[in-house]
Amino acid sequence: MFNYFFLFPGVKCGGVLSAPVGHLSSPNFPRVYPPYTECSWLVVVSEGSTVQLTFQEFNLEYHDTCEYDYIRIHNGASRDEGNLLGTFCGSQLPPNITSSWHVLSVIFHSDKHVGSSGFLATYRKDICGGVLTSLSGVITSPDYPDNYPNNAECHWLISAAPHSTIRLVFTDFQLESQECNFDYVAVFDGSSQEEDQVRHYCGTTKPPDTTSSSNELLVVFKSDFNIGGRGFKAYYSSGECQDVFTAVKGNITSPRYPDMYPNNIICQWNIQLTQGFRIKLFFRDLELEEVNTLTEECDYDYLAVYDGQSTRDKPLGRWCGTNIPAPLISTKNNLLLVLVTDRDTANRGFSVSYIGSKSYLCIG
């Protein structure tokens, strides 16, 4: 009996890359890569950092859905489709990619025929700043939650899809407090540091939630030569990860629905109707990660609904798994939906419909 692996031995390559700067390439680059190749690289840098990946050369067999030879890039480990940042083939250079956290995986696959010259890419640890294009992500000061270093300067440009906006929410904040002359975070509505658009923050009071007026938002952090603090942590979301609904009825779905939603996101959808209306919410579909079997709570991925405009308003429920909740009715003219996902295990997500009516005022 013939051995399949003798006939088609294939090539395996890859490994764990932990240096702050490095490169990866297809086998034999720049010569033609072999058939039946499976390579997997896991780039791991220090906590609080991100990974920036840049392709210098790229030439793989082309297919309109990249089913033959391809590169796949994931936030974190590659086992969950929700971590997928992109699949690439052909001869066009993939865009520069910045991970949402300190782990990035790169998968290279070739099938049995039609090889090409392959690819060459470099990566580097970016401890402070970068261009962020994910639907949602986290920004932290260097070394967070330990004290940030002196004389630091970081620039994060959050870039969303055209015609969308960006929401920025600080969840922790502790900087030196001296009228923001020394250590501060500045938030610019756009991509440039124009003084008439800037807001500076320091001390221990969390900055207010910010929504950009365009598809770009710039965050700058600076520290001077002495006296530090724990720093800050902030979440951002953009595009299909947030929206405001003002029509009397509508539909809301998780990002990429009915395909798997991304990992590690916090998305918010506000339903804001005129005074005198109340909102009835119907769940059409729900498929999120199941409850934590130890706590029996929705500790991993969940959808929460609040009776108002913010998470400080009364919660109406928090759901995960696949059980469809009963319809909900607001007590006022606003509802807030929040989707939170962790770094593992993505599913189809959710689909809901809503309708506003003044007749609900006589209920209950």
Image (tube, rainbow, N blue to C red):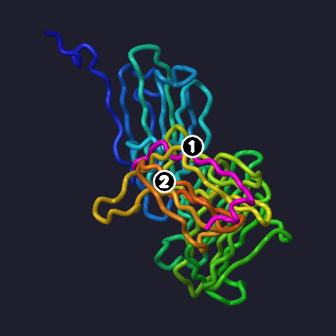
Q: Where residue 270 appears, x then y in whole percent?
A: 68, 59
Count every numbered label the image shows and give the total.
2
Residue at 57% across, 87% down: 227
Q: Is residue 265 above or below residue 361?
A: above
Q: CA distance from mark 1 to mark 2?
A: 44 Å
Give the side of residue 293 with respect to residue 259, left or right.
Answer: left
**Numbered label attached to residue 325:** 2
Q: Nearer the viewer, mark 1 or mark 2?
A: 2
Give the quadrant of the C terminus: bottom right
Say which element carries label 1.
strand
Identity, as a three-letter code, of the amino acid under mark 2: Pro
* Residue 154 visible at all: no
Q: Is residue 350 magenta?
A: yes
How crowded pointer 2 is (Cα within 10 Å; few <14, some 14-19, many 20+) is rated as some
Say what amino acid the circle numbered 1 marks.
Answer: Thr
The percent position of residue 109, horizontal first and vertical second, equals 41, 28
Q: Position of residue 298 (x, y in %)?
A: 41, 60
- The single residue placed furthest to the top in the displayed view is 1
Residue found 59% across the figure and 70% down from its top: 311
The residue sitting at 47% across, 75% down in the picture is: 145
Q: Which mark is residue 54?
A: 1
SS under mark 2: loop
What residue do we see at 27% from left, 20% from top? Answer: 9
In the picture shown, does residue 31 fall above or below 281?
A: above
* Residue 258 in the figure: left or right of residue 363: left
Q: Is residue 160 visible?
A: yes
Q: Specify which label sits upstream in the sequence, 1 or 2.
A: 1
Per the rendered image, the range of residues in magenta is 344-364
- The location of residue 351, given as percent across then percent down, is 56, 45
Residue found at the far bottom of this picture: 178
